[in-house]
Image (spheres, rainbow, N blue to C red):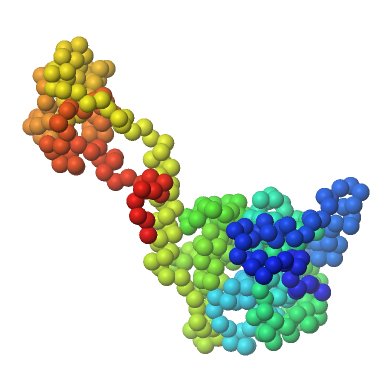
Amino acid sequence: MADVGPGVGKIKGDNAESTDDYVSFLLAQEEPRPPITWNNWWKEVYWGRGVTLMVVMPLCTFFAAYHTPLYTNTAIWMTVYYFMSGMGITAGHHRLWAHRSYNAARVLEYLLALLAAASVQGPIIWWARGHRAHHRYTDTDLDPYNARQGLLWTHIGWVIAKPRRRHGKVDVSDLKRNDIVMWQYRYYPWLVLAMAIAFPTLVAGIGWGDWKGGYVYAAFLRLVIVHHSSSCVNSLAHWLGEAPFDDKHSPRDHLFTALVSLGEGYHNFHHQFPMDYRNAFKWYQYDPTKWLIWLCSKIGLASHLKTFPENEIQKGMLSMELKHLFKKQEELAWPHGGLPVVSWATYKSQAELRPLLCIAGFIHDLEGFMDEHPGGKHILCQYIGKDATAAFFGGVYNHGNAAHNLLAMKRVGMLQCGTPHVTEEKYIPPSQLLRVAHVKELSNQAVY
């Protein structure tokens, strides 16, 4: 039976969790298991839940399926029971018990506990404990499905091989007080036999006489599919897609992962707002688990559905949008700073040697651009060594953003006492009027 005790060794000191780096503190409490080698690998795997359930059982199932005809009724029942048993994990293990994102009536709790047993992914308290550790210690050695160890490890490796570190410490006292959770824990092996094998076989056998098909397809092949669709939440959801809310850790949002995991594919959102009963917060995003929970709330089986404030969700999205804009901004070339300040006489004398133009107090070098000017070279020649501010801002032509931005890149100096005789919107290039600033640039200002 699964271990539901603490996941780390004895913590030294009364204020362990107040240290600056709690993960490093915990990792220092015990030595990691020895590396897996050819000499010890057979002692470092889970032969029951790992090798037998995840390797031997699927191979035997594929062999049996090859020799067993699949009838339409059985295929439909296998699909229906796949969704039902999958919901036992997504709506039950995950959103109800691991994250407490809603309250369920006792009849719904019992139903989800039974359907979760049909998925054979461990008792509620074991599953929720591991998942809470995953959220608390994401992408560290205390994370049972640490994405930093690769796609294969997160998908199936952590189930087969013993981890080099025990899972991080989490609190599951609320689950230990839940009589339905502990009922499922006590009778878990029998519930698995009943719900994962006997029930789907009986439905197909009694319903339309396909005992063998019910056993092979509705029981075992369905179980293989459920295992791997659930595993995609640990693997694909930390590898495929975008991070629209926070890219500090590996969780990602992607429609494909949502399609194969009953809506659990919007994982970046979920890791940011884990108490939200929705995995996909937009109404049109695929999340059948969200729809099921909402429907249960309408018929009195669920209540207190938790949602994160829309304003805070939008802040998270804006933060990442600004980060992407800042990165894009840093990749662009901008006007030179620290320009020399020159007198009008110096400007006039230098303009006799090269094509210099004064606009809004800035001196611009038009070398190489005279022949490319859309209005013709002759217009520029009229203003070399003169003040062309009025002409540039509507006297001859009221230039657009592109012209302002290009002109700013040609600045080579500033006219002494000559800059703002126009508004900021005139002498600041449009590309710089709105600018993303890093907090380091604001270090000399009060930030609250």
Horizontally, is 102 left or right of 77 in the view?
left
Which of these two is toward me, 101 or 17? 17
Residue situated in front as seen by the camera: 167 or 213: 167
- Taking the image as shown, residue 188 lies to the left or right of residue 368, namely right
Question: In percent of the image, x 29 and y 46: which residue is there?
Answer: 434
Outermost residue toward the top in this view: 353
Seen at 66% across and 59% down, the residue is 23
Q: Position of residue 427 (x, y in %)?
A: 20, 36
Quadrant of the rendering where the C terminus is positioned: bottom left
In the displayed orientation, state which residue is furthest to the right.
Answer: 39
Q: Is residue 249 left or right of residue 442?
A: right
Image location (x, y in percent) of residue 242: 51, 52
Q: Quadrant of residue 417?
A: top left
Q: Position of residue 196 (x, y in %)?
A: 76, 74
Q: Which residue corresponds to the image point at 79% horizontal and 82% vertical from the top-left?
A: 187
Which residue occupies 67% across, 79% down? 173
Q: Position of residue 178 (x, y in %)?
A: 67, 84
Name which quarter of the figure residue 302 lies in: bottom right
Instruction: Locate the N terminus and report the quarter of the image it occupies.
Output: bottom right
Q: Is residue 26 visible?
A: yes
Q: Describe residue 295's horizontal placement relative to residue 407 as left or right.
A: right
In the figure, 149 relative to 109: above or below? above
Q: Is residue 281 above or below residue 92?
A: above
Q: Quadrant of residue 31?
A: bottom right
Residue 228 visible: no
